[in-house]
Image (cartoon, helix red, strand yellow):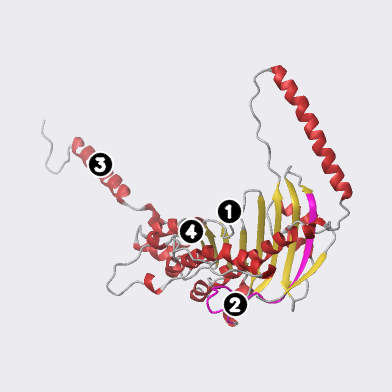
């Protein structure tokens, strides 16, 4: 049977339809569906990502991603590795007197970590890219120069930098937390320090009889501890005991306070380049993975920082000068917290420059400086007897 001229066989029609469908499927597979998303939606996604290393990888995907990702306004920089320089000999000369010993103790324990901090945050001449060198990627410099990594991001409004650890080397049973607000100099600082009670390890029991014996022994031990705590709480009338001044407790609290202020002022000093290169910044946080200290700057404080040049403590100190200060101190020999944590010698210090008025809502200020359970500790301490102290500029 023959078909008339000009007519198409049905099988040819089916083949043509199949070819068209296959071509459409191939075109859909090759098409980048991200191209259907508007730039505003992509920017929202990148702002949710925030982490600088992930954003660097996004910038390497395409020219469009690179263009949009560089417009993010929320960035998080996690410094995960540092390279420390040569050890500095801080104890070559003998110190004389209590003040000299204290200064040696504080600076001797902080000098080397602050040199490391400077290497992390500052951008030295040796790290700059020469005209004949290849471009430096974000992955290569993220662990020692956040300032260089951030140079491609020109619209940052909120910046969080997290150091791999706190500058202050502490024993395991010491709790030391601080939060400082800065403009051109320190505007407020809250410090909480204490000795944390360790929880005894529980060992497996071999028999029911042994379990009963241990249970009775534990009850007696816990009962004795409770009685001791109750006696201490009864003896606690809100005043600092005389032993606080004679057993070294006062000295350790002075060291904690000065160390926190030096750590905060060193972080503040080394942020100059980042703040200068990002005029759009409205909020800046510099924290550490240990949760030891937080430096924060608001939009108004950042403006003050740009308008008023900061004063260095000395030519070689690499930290902002700390002005004369007024301090309020609260102390509790024993402070049990709602979650079961027990703090001994808990000390809370609220610090402000001598020429600024005291905050109206001090309780909210100190409680809001920390996360739980230490926010509860600050709330309990601030209700106790207040002691006033002063400190000269340094």
Classify 10 Å Cα crowding around label 3: few (below 14), some (14-19), many (20 and above): few
Q: What residue is at 53 percent from the left and 59 percent from the top?
A: 163
Please report whichever mark, 3 or 2, sits nearer to the chain's N-terminal start.
3
Q: What residue is at 65 percent from the left and 66 percent from the top?
A: 101
Q: Are marks 4 and 3 in contact (CB under 8 Å)?
A: no
Is disc 1 placed on a helix, strand or loop?
A: loop
Q: Looking at the picture, how far across and down is residue 85, in whole percent?
A: 44, 64
Query: How far is disc 3 from disc 2 in space, using C-alphas?
Result: 80 Å
Q: Are marks 2 and 1 in contact (CB under 8 Å)?
A: no
Query: How far is disc 4 from disc 3 in space, using C-alphas?
Result: 57 Å
Please report whichever mark, 2 or 4, sits nearer to the chain's N-terminal start.
4
Asked if the stretch drawn in magenta spans residue 32, the answer is no
Classify 10 Å Cα crowding around label 1: few (below 14), some (14-19), many (20 and above): few
> Magenta part of the protein: which range?
309-334
Q: Quadrant of residue 98?
A: bottom right
**Res 113 visible:** yes
Please report whichever mark, 1 or 4, sits nearer to the chain's N-terminal start.
4
From the image, tell me which residue sits under label 4: 79
Quarter of the image with the C terminus is bottom right
Label at residue 88: none
Is disc 2 placed on a helix, strand or loop?
A: loop
Which secondary structure dominates the residues rendered in magenta?
loop
Classify 10 Å Cα crowding around label 4: few (below 14), some (14-19), many (20 and above): many
From the image, tell me which residue sits under label 2: 313
Please report whichever mark, 2 or 1, sits nearer to the chain's N-terminal start.
1
Q: Quadrant of residue 14?
A: top left
| Front position in the image: 19 or 196 | 196
From the image, tell me which residue sits under label 3: 17
Query: How far is disc 1 from disc 4 in space, using C-alphas?
Result: 13 Å
From the image, tell me which residue sits under label 1: 290
Check the image and report above or below for 174 versus 129. Answer: above
């Amino acid at each position: 049977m023959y078909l008339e001229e000009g007519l198409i066989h049905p099988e040819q029609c089916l083949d043509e339809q199949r070819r068209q469908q296959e071509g459409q499927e191939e075109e859909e597979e090759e098409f980048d569906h991200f191209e259907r998303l508007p730039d505003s939606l992509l920017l929202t996604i990148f702002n949710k990502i925030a982490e600088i290393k992930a954003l660097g990888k996004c910038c390497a995907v395409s020219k469009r991603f690179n263009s949009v990702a560089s417009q993010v306004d929320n960035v998080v920089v996690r410094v995960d590795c540092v390279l420390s320089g040569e050890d500095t000999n801080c104890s070559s000369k003998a110190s004389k007197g209590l003040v000299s010993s204290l200064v040696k103790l504080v600076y001797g324990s902080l000098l080397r970590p602050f040199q490391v901090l400077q290497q992390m945050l500052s951008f030295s001449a040796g790290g700059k890219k020469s005209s004949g060198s290849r471009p430096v990627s974000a992955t290569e410099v993220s662990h020692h120069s956040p300032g260089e990594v951030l140079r491609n991001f020109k619209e940052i409004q909120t910046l969080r930098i997290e150091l791999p650890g706190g500058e202050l080397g502490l024993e395991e049973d010491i709790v030391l937390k601080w939060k400082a607000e800065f403009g051109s100099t320190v505007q407020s600082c809250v410090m909480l320090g204490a000795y944390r009670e360790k929880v005894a390890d529980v060992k497996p029991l071999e028999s029911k009889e042994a379990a009963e014996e241990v249970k009775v022994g534990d009850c007696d031990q816990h009962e004795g501890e409770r009685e001791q705590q109750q006696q201490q709480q009864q003896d606690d009338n809100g005043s600092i005991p005389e032993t606080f001044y004679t057993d070294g407790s006062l000295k350790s609290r002075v060291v904690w306070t000065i160390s926190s202020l030096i750590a905060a002022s060193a972080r503040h000093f080394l942020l100059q380049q980042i703040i200068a290169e990002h005029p759009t910044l409205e909020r800046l946080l510099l924290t550490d993975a240990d949760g030891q200290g937080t430096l924060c700057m608001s939009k108004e404080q950042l403006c003050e920082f740009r308008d008023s040049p900061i004063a260095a403590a000395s030519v070689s100190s690499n930290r902002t000068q700390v002005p004369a200060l007024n301090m309020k101190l609260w102390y509790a020999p024993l402070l049990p917290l709602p979650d079961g944590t027990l703090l001994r010698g808990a000390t809370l210090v609220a610090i402000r420059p001598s020429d600024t008025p005291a905050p109206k809502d001090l309780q909210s200020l100190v409680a809001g400086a920390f996360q739980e359970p230490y926010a509860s500790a600050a709330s309990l301490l601030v209700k106790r007897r207040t002691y006033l102290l002063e400190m000269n500029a340094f």
